[in-house]
Every structure is written in structure tokens, then in C-alpha cells.
Image (cartoon, grey):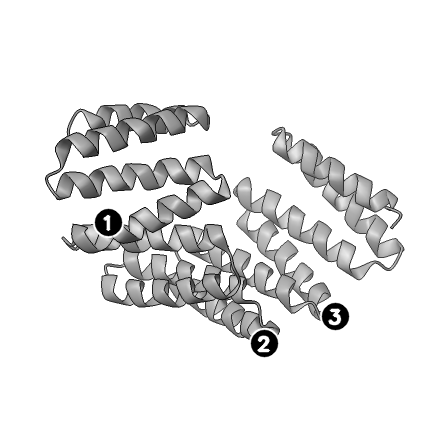
Amino acid sequence: MTRSEADHVLDEAETLWLSGEKQRARECCLRARLLYHETGDVRGEADALTRMGDIEAETGHGNGARQAYVEARQLYARGGDQREQGAVLVRLAHLAQREGDETQARALYQSALEVYDSAGESSGLGHVHRALGHLDRDGGAQDKALDRYREALACYRRSSDTLGEAGTLKAMAAIQLALGHPDQARPQCEEALGLMREAGNLLGEAKASRLMARILAAEGRRDEARKAMHAAAKMFARAGDVASHDEAEQESKTL
């Protein structure tokens, strides 16, 4: 399939964004949006608006991000693309969370659940259930969070989403540890570690290894805990996360 001028401009926006040139990236998104509009490419225009919304959100321009996302969703709806509509609703929910509007965030997540369910998009359902679980967890409703995580886990397994499954297992293990159940946390964390390793996600493996160290420490297995924390520190270093490496090394001294 021949790529259009607009496609190349949107690619340039991505490159500029990743290199930190946010303003030039935004300008490329605007140009790509106009080019897609001129050629009647509704999906392309929606993609450009979504990218522009991401840039606006990252640079702290909530209103600009919201406007771009709403316009993008309207275009995706015109094209009947439920999966992308769901993804935009999730972005709007994240925006509401950052602005401290939990009620609006939950309403948007619920709308995303309905769209993903209608589309039969299991991985998307998993992402939303997990996000709602995080909201419950942060609000102190640990039991409700675990229920949401179980829903997410089932969705991820249906869609063979390995990283989603691993991240959810890690979140469940962290709650079990916080509740004083390291014996229940350990098998979940072990499974998460294995899945992260299988997927080749070094940073995820490092985070799971750090959690495993804390679980082992809670079980009184201090030597194993320090070994696991040192392993996590090395993985953080290999992944380029210097701050987490230093924190893990420091934490290993307290185990």
C-alpha cells in the first residue's frame, strides 16, 4: 500500500516527539491532520488528532488534549472503529484522573468497557478493568481492586496478552503483600516474573524481581531477598533506569 504525504508527516511528528521536540511535533500533527482531511482520509485524520492529543496531554495542556481526543473519537465513530473509540475514551479517562476528577474518570472507563465489550476486544477490556482496579487500590478499597484485577486477568488470558497478564499478576501480588499475605503474593509474583522474562520485557522483569525481594523479606528469607533485590538492580541498570537501580541497591541494604 502506497503511503501518503500525510503518513510521512505523521511519522515525522512521532520522531520529533520522541526526540523531545514537542512543539515541532505538534505542528506536524496539525499539518498531517489537514492533509488527511483534504484527501478525505477519516481514519488518518483521527490518528493525527489522537497523536496531537497525546502531545497536548504530555505537555500539560489538558483542554487542548481533550478537544483533540473528542474530535478524534467522533471521526473514529464515523468510520465504525470501536477499538480506537475505546482507546480514546481511556485517554480521556487518564486525563480526568490527572486533573483529580475521579467521578468523570470512572464514567469514561465505564464507557470504554461498553465499547470494548461491543467490539469483542478482550485486551482493551483488560486494560480498563486494571485501570479501575488501580483506582480502587489507591482509594484503599483493596478487595474491590482484587476483584477488578481478576476480571482483567481473565480478559488478558482470553486475548493471550502476556504483558497485560504479567502486569496484573504483579499488581495482585503487591496487594496481597500489603495485606500481609506474602504466601499468596509469592506464586503470583513468580508467575509475573516468568511471563515478563518470556516476553523479553527487562524493565518489567526488574520491577517484578524487586517485588519478589520484598515478598521474600516479609517471609523472613533475608538472604534470598537481598539476592533478588541485587538482581533487580542489575536489570534496572541494563534497562537504562539509573534511578531505580540506585533505589534498589539502597533498599537491598535494609532487607
Helix, strand or loop for disc 2: helix
Mark on residue 186? Answer: 1
Say above or below: 15 vs 32.
Answer: above
Q: What residue lies at 61% left-to-right and 50% top-to-bottom?
A: 64
Question: Could you say which is closer to the camera, residue 150 or residue 219?
Answer: 219
Q: Earlier in the sequence, mark 1 or mark 3?
A: 3
Q: Which residue is mark 3?
A: 78
Q: What residue lies at 46% left-to-right and 54% top-to-bottom?
A: 164
Dots 2, 1 in contact, CB < 8 A: no
Q: Amino acid at mark 3?
A: Arg
Mark on residue 207? Answer: none
In the rendering, at what x and y percent does residue 2 appear?
89, 47
Q: Is residue 129 visible?
A: yes
Could you say which quadrant of the image residue 106 lies in?
A: bottom left
Mark on residue 118? Answer: 2
Could you say which quadrant of the image residue 184 lies in?
A: bottom left
